[in-house]
Image (spheres, rainbow, N blue to C red):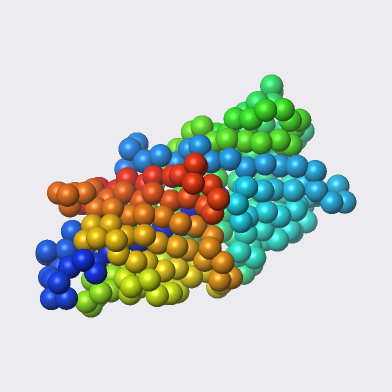
Amino acid sequence: MRRLWLGVALLGFPLGALAADNPWVGTWKLDAAKSHFTGDTFTYSKGPNGLIHYSDGSTTQYDFGTDGKEYKTWAGRMTTWTAAGPTTWNTVTKQDGAVVYQTRRELSADGKTLTLTTTSNKPDGSPVGEVAVYERVGKGTGLLGKWRSTKTDIASPSAMVITAPSAGVLRLEYPGWKAVYEAKLDGSEFKPTGPTIPANFTGSMKSASATKVNYVYRLNGKPDGYGVMTVSADGKTLTDVSWNPGKESEKSTGYYVKQ
């Protein structure tokens, strides 16, 4: 699953603003119950040479087989599909040879529901679970067809820590993933760091106001995701609305609460 984090704006503050006066600074925890991570769609169709073609309708598409061999997927990662039965598949996704996550896909008896149970591996080796349920859209047989997510259950939502190391710069840290996003807030390109960040992944952030920022993610220099982060007037909540290129109708919303 392609779900990345980014954001925040500071350019609307005076250069001498203190952290205590900056509503972005603090520790933010995702409230999964108030977030909206459903409605996205993807398709499986017949690919070349008996393979299956995946497409999210945006920038991600690739071909794979269920033969236990490795196939290239998003951002150069490798995926392996192994059939565990006529309607069940186990997949392993790696980045630079290290396992990033493992997923068990189970098709319901009537072929109308596809359940993905994913275990991601944090850098310290501890697991994080997520269950996503997709329903078939229109006609299709087996995996083939269009699928739309209807339910997502995240076992242990991540927290992010935001600091302001200097004027016009913010630093977002995700301790559990050892990921750091530090950027100037003038729209210039920056490079996130962390063991699960692809080498060819970059971003840019630009302030729209003191409490709102627009951002863009890029893969190999091309847009791969857009979003808007906003802090509430009372500084207690933060929303992150994101979408993939060409899929503005399938936006996701992360709802964070300041701790």
Q: How many marks?
A: 0
What is the quadrant of residue 107 in the picture? top right
* Horizontal side, residue 10 vs residue 174: left or right: left
Residue 150 % position (x, y): 51, 32
Residue 98 % position (x, y): 60, 65
Say which residue appears at 50% left-offset and 37% top-offset: 39
Say which residue appears at 54% left-offset and 36% top-offset: 149
Residue 20 % position (x, y): 12, 64
Say which residue appears at 39% left-offset and 49% top-offset: 241
Of residues 13 and 48, the one nearer the viewer is 13
Image height check: is 15 above or below 213?
below
Image height check: is 74 above or below 151?
below
Report the residue that reaches farthest toward the top: 110
Of residues 150 and 248, the one nearer the viewer is 248
What is the quadrant of residue 213 in the picture? bottom left
Residue 229 % position (x, y): 33, 55
Image height check: is 122 above or below 144?
below
Of residues 221 and 5, the one nearer the viewer is 221
Say which residue appears at 67% left-offset and 58% top-offset: 73
